[in-house]
Amino acid sequence: MVKLTWYGHAAWQIDFQDAVVIVDPFLRNNPKAPVKPENLGKIDFVVVTHNHDDHLGDAFEIARNKGAKLISIFENVVEATNEKIPDENIIGMNIGNLVDLGKIKVALVQAIHSGNCSGVVITGDGVTIYHAGDTGLFSDMKLIGQMYKPKVSLLPTGGFYTMGPKEAAMAARMIGSEIVIPMHYGTFPGIDSNPNELKEALSPEVKVPILKPGESFIV
C-alpha cells in the first residue's frame, strides 16, 4: 500500500512502507497548503523538480530539520551546504537512469520548463509514480511511460505556466498510467483551470481522482 497526500500546488507526500517522500514542498507560503513544515512527521527524502520558489519552497528547511536526503538536479542543491545540510544527505543528480537509494528508486526525467527542471519517477513497494513537475506537453512522455510504466501520474493542469487539461489528457494517453491525478491548479490567479475537464477527457478508461489539499489517495 502506498499513500499519496496532496498538499496543494505541486506538493505531495508519498508514504511507502519503509520511506516517506515529499516532493516540491511549497508549504509555508502556499495559500492552499493544509500543513506547514513544522507540522510534518517523519520525512526520509525531499525531492525538488526545479528551483522556482513555488517548488523549492521549504525543501532546505525540511531536509535540515528532518535529517532527510535532498534530491534534485545538481545545480539546484549546490546551496544546500550553506543551509547546514550534511554533504551525505545531498543527492545532486541529473536526468538519466533509475537510481537505487535503498528504500526507494528515483529517476529524474525530462520536463519542458525553466529553472533547472525535471520530472521525477519514484518506485517503491512495487508501485511506480511519475510526478511531472512543471512542464508543457512533449512527445517523449511516451518514452517515460514505456521505460518506467508508472501506475500513477501526477500531472500539472493549471495552464499558463504548464499544461492545461487538454494537454494533460494527451500526456496521460502517451504515458499510459492507470491513475492520473491533476495538480498545480487553483493556487494563484492564472492557473485556475477546471480539473474535471481532465477527468471528463480520460474517464472511464483512466481513473482520475480529484483531491482537495490535505486529501489522500491509496494505491
Image (spheres, rainbow, N blue to C red):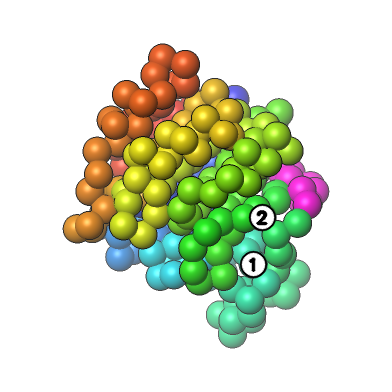
Q: Which kind of residue does numbered mark 1 sit on? A: Ile
- Furthest residue to the top? 204
The residue carrying mark 1 is 73
Residue range (magenta): 97-105
- Furthest residue to the left? 189
The one nearer the camera, 189 or 39, is 189
In the picture, measured across the screen, residue 203 lies left or right of residue 86, that is left
Q: Percent position (x, y) of residue 163?
A: 40, 49
CA separation, marks 1 and 2? 8 Å
Q: Residues within 10 Å of mark 1 (few under 14, many from 20)?
A: many
Tell me whether circle 1 and circle 2 mark residues in contact (CB < 8 Å).
yes
Q: Percent position (x, y) of residue 62?
A: 51, 63
Q: Residues within 10 Å of mark 2 (few under 14, many from 20)?
A: many
SS for callout 2: strand
The residue carrying mark 2 is 108
Residue drawn at x 72%, y 75% is 87
- Disc tally is 2
Using the rendered image of the protein, determine whether residue 120 is visible from the camera's viewpoint.
yes
In the picture, measured across the screen, residue 168 lies left or right of residue 121, that is left
Q: Which kind of residue does numbered mark 2 sit on? A: Leu
Residue drawn at x 50%, y 71% is 115
